[in-house]
């Protein structure tokens, strides 16, 4: 037995620091007391969700490595970043709410005088290894150090494309607080974040950061970073509400009926940030298609004319077999069909969701391989988005008046577990 313990200790020492740490002690005891933890794992809303590719692995490999389709999964040219992000962020938002999509699921939300950074990933690869794993398809719009002070970092779950060790270590040296789902704090403490700066929440629990209220809400996904997936860390979507504005960030999730409950309890929102990329028929329960993402947005908002949807979790990493531009195109089509507002900023382009207009040009078309038959017309969508925004603004003014006289190395297999996470 002594020899076995020595071997086990040796193997543990070889594990990369990016694997993080498993919950233990009172943190683990709290996990076991959670009403969402049963039979040794966290449970998904809506029943068991398939977290591994379903069907034949041979069929999946044929699809993923198809020589004709593979080039479509990456841009054909340089992704156009917004050129003046730093200067734009130096000016306070005129409306009190501004969102800046940094790529993938990373979003800076400036809300009622506070700054919230969702799922910050500034690393070159979403992987525990610096030499392998899905690599960035475009640079981060600006260095992390140039971002300036952040009041709170919000993490949706512990997969590598949402919880990036180099980024967390850099932020550990600042004064920012961290709001994370239950159990995820073990990773952050392992990387140097003090326990006093952690706000670790179960679903439906809230915490205050200044005048902001942050609430962890359900999502349909899974967790894991190491060689073993113990399902001992929770995944979540998040509601952030200020004195005047409120936003929603989906994290990663499959579609489920619970979006309606989240909207009823916390909405409507001035903006939703919804995952619409890295989907596949091989894992339909844990990521949404653009059509499902729009359906979730409408469930959360209750009506198409509410605050816009910002599509996230796409364009930055190659994590699924679909073409690189497909999530953007699909979101445009879904918005047009629903008559809903969407925002389509370039990475690094700040916008104010409650302003009369938001970015809505298909910027990706200039660097993506066009589908057979060319791109569909986008002008009608842009005109519709502007008109919908104007109509919403007019209704708001009317309401106010009435109240006073609302790859193997680049990503193969399951996109969240390459490698082992």
Image: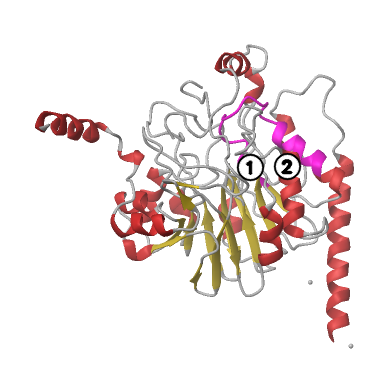
Q: What residue sits 32% from the left and 62% below the top? A: 195
Q: Which mark is residue 13?
A: none
How packed mark 2 is, by other alpha carbons closer than 10 Å (few <14, some 14-19, many 20 or more), is some
Residue furthest to the left? 2
Element on which disc 1 rests = loop
Above/below status of 332 relative to 131: below
Q: Quadrant of the C terminus?
A: top left
Q: Nearer the viewer, residue 42 or 406?
A: 42
Q: What residue span does the magenta drawing correspond to?
A: 311-334
Q: Nearer the viewer, residue 39 or 380?
A: 39
Q: What residue sits 76% from the left and 36% below the top? A: 330
Residue 200 position in % (x across, y down): 43, 60
Left or right of 151 on screen, residue 228: left
Above/below status of 189 relative to 319: below
Q: What residue sits 47% from the left and 62% below the top? A: 152
Q: Which residue is mark 2?
A: 292
Left or right of 120 on screen, residue 253: right
Q: How many marks?
A: 2
Picture quadrant where residue 226 is located: top left
Residue 233 position in % (x across, y down): 43, 48
Question: Is residue 156 rendered magenta in the image?
Answer: no
Q: Which residue is mark 1?
A: 254
Label 1 near label 2: C-beta < 8 Å?
A: yes
For residue 76, say whether it is visible.
Answer: no
Q: Earlier in the sequence, mark 2 or mark 1?
A: 1
Question: Is residue 325 rendered magenta in the image?
Answer: yes
- What is the C-alpha distance between the residues marked 2 and 1? 8 Å
């Amino acid at each position: 037995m002594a020899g076995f313990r020595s071997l086990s200790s040796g193997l543990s020492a070889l594990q990369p620091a990016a694997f993080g740490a498993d919950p233990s002690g009172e943190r683990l005891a709290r996990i076991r007391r959670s009403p969402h933890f049963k039979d040794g794992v966290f449970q998904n809303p809506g029943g068991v969700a398939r977290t591994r590719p379903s069907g034949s692995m041979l069929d999946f490999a044929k699809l993923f490595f198809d020589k004709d389709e593979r080039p479509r999964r990456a841009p054909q040219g340089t992704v156009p970043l917004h050129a003046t992000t730093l200067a734009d962020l130096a000016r306070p938002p005129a409306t009190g709410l501004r969102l800046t999509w940094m790529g993938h699921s990373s979003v800076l939300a400036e809300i009622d005088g506070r700054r919230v950074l969702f799922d910050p990933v500034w690393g070159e690869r979403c992987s525990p290894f610096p030499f392998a794993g899905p690599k960035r398809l475009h640079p981060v719009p600006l260095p992390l150090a140039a971002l300036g002070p952040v009041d709170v970092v919000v993490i949706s779950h512990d997969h590598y494309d949402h919880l990036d060790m180099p980024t967390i270590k850099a932020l550990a040296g600042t004064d920012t607080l961290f709001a994370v789902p239950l159990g995820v704090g073990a990773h952050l403490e392992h990387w140097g974040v003090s326990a006093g700066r952690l706000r670790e929440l179960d679903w439906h629990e809230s915490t205050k950061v200044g005048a902001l209220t942050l609430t962890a809400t359900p999502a349909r996904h899974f967790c894991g970073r190491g060689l073993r997936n113990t399902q001992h860390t929770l995944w979540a979507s998040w509601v952030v509400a200020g004195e005047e504005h409120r936003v929603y960030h989906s994290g990663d999730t499959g579609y489920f009926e619970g979006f309606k409950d989240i909207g009823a309890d916390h909405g409507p929102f001035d903006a939703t940030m919804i995952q619409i990329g890295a989907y596949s028929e091989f894992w339909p329960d844990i990521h949404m298609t653009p059509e499902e993402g729009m359906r979730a947005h409408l469930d959360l908002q209750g009506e198409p004319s509410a605050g816009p949807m910002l599509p996230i979790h796409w364009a930055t990493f190659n994590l699924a077999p679909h073409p690189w531009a497909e999530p953007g195109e699909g979101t445009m089509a879904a918005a047009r069909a629903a008559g809903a507002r969407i925002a389509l900023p370039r990475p690094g382009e700040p916008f104010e969701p409650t302003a009369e207009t938001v970015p809505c040009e298909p910027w990706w078309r200039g660097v993506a391989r066009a589908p057979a038959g060319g791109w569909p017309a986008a002008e009608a969508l842009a005109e519709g988005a502007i008109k919908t925004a104007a109509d919403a603004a007019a209704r708001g003014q009317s309401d106010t008046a009435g109240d006073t006289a609302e790859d193997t190395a680049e990503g193969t297999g399951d996109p969240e577990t390459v490698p082992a996470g």
